[in-house]
Image (cartoon, rainbow, N blue to C red):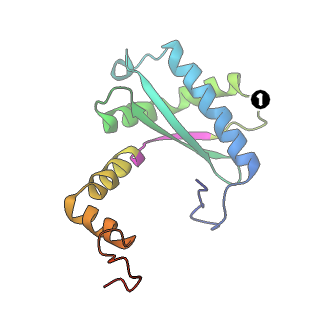
Amino acid sequence: MIRVTRRTGRAPSQRQLRVGEELRHALVRILGRGSLRDPALDGIQVTVTEVHVGPDLRNATAFVVPFGGGQADALAAALNRAAGFFRAQLAREVKLRHVPGIQFQVDRSFDHASRIDRLLHDPRVASDVAGEDGSDSDTGDGSGA
């Protein structure tokens, strides 16, 4: 999936994608260590699904979901409170001239995909989709009637 940035209207550069993926891996390592002092983050397992980096590489948004479900908004708020800690840890993990500021957001793409899946399996929608290819309404004479 090619993601177009809102401001420039262009897809992210290869550098943005590489830096984002490196930051994602580093965040997973940091979270895996369990060295967070915030009680709201104690023992919580987090999935970092994607990291988007701005065109100037100064800001990054990490999309997260709690592993196994849970309070996603509370998790994002707790991670944002610890953003300074994460930036300092990222500076040690990733070799960049400037470590971007990090912001955490709940990844709602799974909810969106689930909603689309439910809609596609709705009997009313399924009948419309089946009718488009002509298999249900085709009489075999090529006229479609």
Give how far across and how far down residue 84 sits, in percent: 54, 31
* Residue in the image at 34% along x and 76% along y: 138
* Residue in the image at 25% along x and 66% along y: 127
* Residue in the image at 40% along x and 70% along y: 133
Secondary structure at badge 1 equals loop
Task: Please indicate whether residue 99 sits to the left or right of residue 67 in the image.
Answer: right
* Residue in the image at 32% along x and 78% along y: 139
Give how far across and how far down residue 63 sits, in percent: 48, 41
Region rendered in magenta: 101-109
**Residue found at the very far front of the displayed protein:** 141
Q: Residues within 10 Å of mark 1 (few under 14, many from 20)?
A: few
Task: Please indicate whether residue 76 sits to the left or right of residue 97 in the image.
Answer: left
Q: Is residue 138 above or below residue 38?
A: below
Give how far across and how far down residue 25 sits, in percent: 62, 28
Q: Is residue 40 above or below residue 2?
A: above
Which is the main secondary structure of the residues drawn in magenta? strand
Residue in the foreground of this view, choosing between 11 and 88? 11
* Quarter of the figure with the C terminus: bottom left
**Residue found at the very far left of the displayed protein:** 123
Q: Quadrant of residue 19?
A: top right
Residue in the foreground of this view, choosing between 97 and 48? 48
Residue 106: say if magenta. yes
Residue 54: say if magenta. no
Q: Quadrant of residue 20?
A: top right
Residue in the foreground of this view, choosing between 125 and 5? 125
Q: Amino acid at mark 1?
A: Lys
Q: Which residue is mark 1?
A: 95
Give how far across and how far down residue 94 sits, in percent: 72, 28
Task: Please indicate whether residue 35 sits to the left or right of residue 78 in the image.
Answer: right
